[in-house]
Amino acid sequence: MPPTRRHATSLVVPVEEKRKDRRARHRAERDLAAELADAAKYAERTKRAAERQQRREQPYLPLAGEPGPDALRTRRSLRVQPHRATSATLAAAYPFLAEAGLGGEGMLIGSDAFSRRAFVYDPWVLYEKRVLQDPNLSVAGSIGTGKSALLKSLVARSLCFGRRAYIAGDPKGEWTGLTQAVGGTAIELGPGMSARLNPLDAGARPAGLSDEDSRTKVRSHRLSLLTSLAESLTGAPLQPVEHTAIGVALDHATTATERPTLPQVVRHLLDPDADAELPPGVPDVEQLCADGRHVGHALARLVLGDLAGLFDAETTVEFDPATPMISIDVSRIGEDSPLIPLVMTCASAWMEAALRDPTGGNRWMVYDEAWKIMRHPPLVRRMETQWRLSRHWGIANVLAVHQWADFDAVGELGSQTRAQAKSLLAETSTRIIYRQPADQLAQTADVMGLNATETDLLPQLVLGRGLWRILGQGGPRSFLVDHRLARSELSMFTTDARMGGLADEPAQQAW
C-alpha cells in the first residue's frame, strides 16, 4: 500500500491569518509535498517490479533477433568507437568492399576467395573490352597444386562458346581422354604407331591471298621450320651457306611435288640434282652439296634415325579445322626423352598451318610442361612469333611451367634467347600463380611485380587456389580464386585423382 499522512490539511489561505495559523499551514504544505513525492516513488517502484516480473515470465530475445521484420535486432545496442582514417586505409579495412570481378561473360572458373562471388573469365571477351592487353595466359605452380586441372577445365568449358583447342605436345598423355570425350582428335605419335604428320604441309589457304602471296607465306613457314629443326639437331645457329642450301633443297622438292616431305628435302641436301639451278655465289653442284651436307645429315635423323616413322611421309591423319580439340600425344616417346622438343617443333608447325588463318575463329594453343621445350632456342623463337601474332590470328597461347626460374634456364645470361623467353611473359596479360616454394618467392615477386601481401600468400595457397594477375590498360589487378570442379570433371581433369589428392581439399570440393 502507498504511504499516507495522518495530518493532511487544506491549503486554503484565509484573508487575515494569524502567525500561529500561518506556521500550521506551512507545515501542512510540506507534509503534502512529501506525500506526493512518496507516491511518485512508489509508483516508479511498482512499475519496475512489474517489468521485472514480465521479463521473468518471457524468454530473452535471441541473439540473432526475432524472426520477421525484427530480424537481426539484438537486446544489446551496438556501440562502435569513432575512428578516423584515410579513404585508402578505410577501403582495405571496411569488410564489405571487394573487387568487382571481370564480368559475367565467359567460362565459370570458381569463386573469388574474398567476395565469394562467381569468377568468370574469357580472354577474347576481355580483350575486346580492353580489359586485357592480349589473350595469352601463363600458369605456374609446384607439382600437385592444380594447374593442369585448371587448364583442362578452362579449355573444356570454352568449347560450348565456340572455341577450339590445339595441344601441340602432350608428354604425359593427360589430354587424350579429354580430347576423345569432347569429340576431338587425339593423335598418338611414337614407335610402332601408324599416325604420320608431315610438318611441311601447306595447310588451309587464308582467305584473300593471291596465289603468289600464298606461295610466299608457305615457303617462309617451311623454311622457318627446317631452320628450327636443323639448329635443334646441330645445337648451333646455321651458317649463311647452310641457309642457302636449305632454301635450294626446299625449292627443288616443291618443284617436284605440291606436297614436299622431309625425306625429299634431305635427299636434295645430300645429293642435289646435277641439273639443279644454282643460287648466286655457288659455282657448282659439288659446292652446293658441301654447303648442305652437315645440315642434311642432321635432318636425316628425322628420316633414318630414332625419329623415323613419325614425320617422314605424307600426313595420314585428317586435319579438320571444325574439330573442337586436337591433341598430339607423345607419351609413347618417353616423358624425359630429349627428342620431345623436336617432336613438338614438328607438331606445332603442322598445327600452325591452321593457326595462321585469321578467319579460323578463337582457338587455344596449349604448351603444357613448357619448361621442357623452353630450353631450346629454335622453339622459343617460334613461340615468340605465335605470341606476337596471337591477336592477329585470334589465338590464346597458354604456357604452363612449374616456376618462373624456368625462364632463367633459357640460354645464357644476357643472350638473345633468354630475352625472347622473357618476352613471352611480357606478351602475356593473364598470369596465374599457384603455390610456390619459399626459395622462389623473391624471384616470383620480382618477375610478377607482386606486393608484400601477395608474396606472403604464395606459400600458403591450398590446392586449387591461385593468385590471378590481370594486366590491362588500367594497371594490374589481382584476384584470389578458388577453382571449382564438378564431380564428373574430377576424374577427367585431375592428374593425381588416384592418390586422392583433390577429394580431401576444401578448395577443390566438387559442387
Image (cartoon, rainbow, N blue to C red):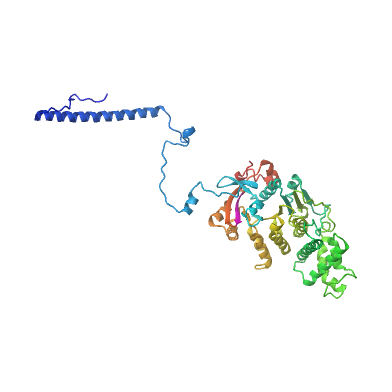
The spot of residue 427 in percent (x, y) is: 65, 60
Compared with 98, 473 (above or below) is below
Q: Measured along the vertical axis of the image, is residue 479 above or below residue 375?
A: above
Q: Which quarter of the rendered picture does the N terminus lie within?
A: top left
Q: Relative to residue 271, is residue 487 drawn left or right?
A: left
- 264 up-or-down from 187: above or below: below
Q: Nearer the viewer, residue 65 or 126?
A: 126
What is the span of residues highlighted in magenta in the rendered image? 465-472
Say whether residue 401 is visible: no
Q: Residue at x 35, y 27 (%)?
A: 50
Q: Is residue 466 shown in magenta?
A: yes
Residue pictured at 80% horizontal, 52% vertical: 319
Q: Position of residue 178 (x, y in %)?
A: 73, 46
User: Please, is residue 22 above or below residue 238 in the view?
Assistant: above
Q: Quadrant of residue 237?
A: bottom right
User: In the orientation shown, which residue stands out farthest toward the right?
Assistant: 275
Of the 4 image quadrants, the one containing the C terminus is top right
Can residue 97 be seen here? yes
Expressed as whole percent of the image width and height from the top left, the position of residue 242 reads 80, 70
Question: Which residue is nearer to you in this view: 187 or 193?
Answer: 187
User: Which SS does the magenta portion mostly show?
Assistant: strand
- Across and down, in percent, residue 38 comes to 25, 29
Question: Quarter of the image holding residue 209?
Answer: bottom right
**Magenta stretch: includes residue 403:** no
User: On the picture, is 57 further left or further right than 135?
Assistant: left
How many numbered badges does the structure rendering display?
Answer: 0
